[in-house]
Image (cartoon, rainbow, N blue to C red):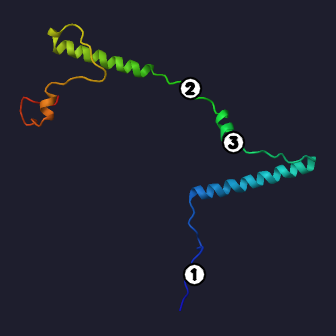
Amino acid sequence: MTTIVHGKTVRPITHASGRRKDRRKAEAIQRELVASRIDKVLGLKPEKRKPLTRIELACKRKPAPPLDLSPLTQYQEQITHSAQKHMKARYPHRGAVVEFEEGSCCLPQVALYAAGYQKCENVTAR
């Protein structure tokens, strides 16, 4: 009768991130060995660095530059201008300038279309 042994396989499955981590760890160990040998030859004590705290790391970061909103406002002005031109052409009797509310524009017969009269020939969503 054969015994089943659970444990490490002959070829464990490794991912690229694990291989990279192992490679970087080996490089760091090699770097530390070289640095310690140089310090030993020169008679220096190895430099001990304490890890930075979260606050110190946050203070080292540069603040983000302010956002440039000019392209967005130009685009909004273009849309408003073209909508006003459309309203002048479609409804000339209403006056020269039509003011829009913030973020809303009425379409003809939208309420009828939304209410379920899509099959009527004279009601469209456009």
Q: Which residue is mark 2?
A: 65
Disc nearer the start of the sequence (1/2): 1
- Measuring 30% from the left and 17% from the top, which residue is drawn there? 80
Is residue 17 rendered to the left or right of residue 32? left
- Asked which secondary structure carries label 3, the reply is loop
Residue 71 image point, x, y percent: 43, 21
Residue 118 in the image: above or below residue 97: below
Q: Amino acid at mark 3?
A: Thr
Residue ranking furthest to the top: 96
Q: Amino acid at mark 1?
A: Val
Q: CA distance from mark 1 to mark 2?
A: 59 Å
Residue 4 image point, x, y percent: 55, 83
- Measuring 14% from the left and 9% from the top, which residue is drawn there? 93
Could you say which is closer to the camera, residue 118 or residue 30?
118
Could you say which is closer to the camera, residue 17 or residue 51?
51
Disc nearer the start of the sequence (2/3): 3
Which quadrant holds residue 96?
A: top left
Q: Which residue is mark 3?
A: 53
Quadrant where the C terminus sits is top left
Q: Which residue is mark 1?
A: 5
Q: Amino acid at mark 2?
A: Pro
- Measuring 59% from the left and 71% from the top, which residue is drawn there? 11
- Between marks 3 and 1 in the image, the one whose residue lies nearer the viewer: 3
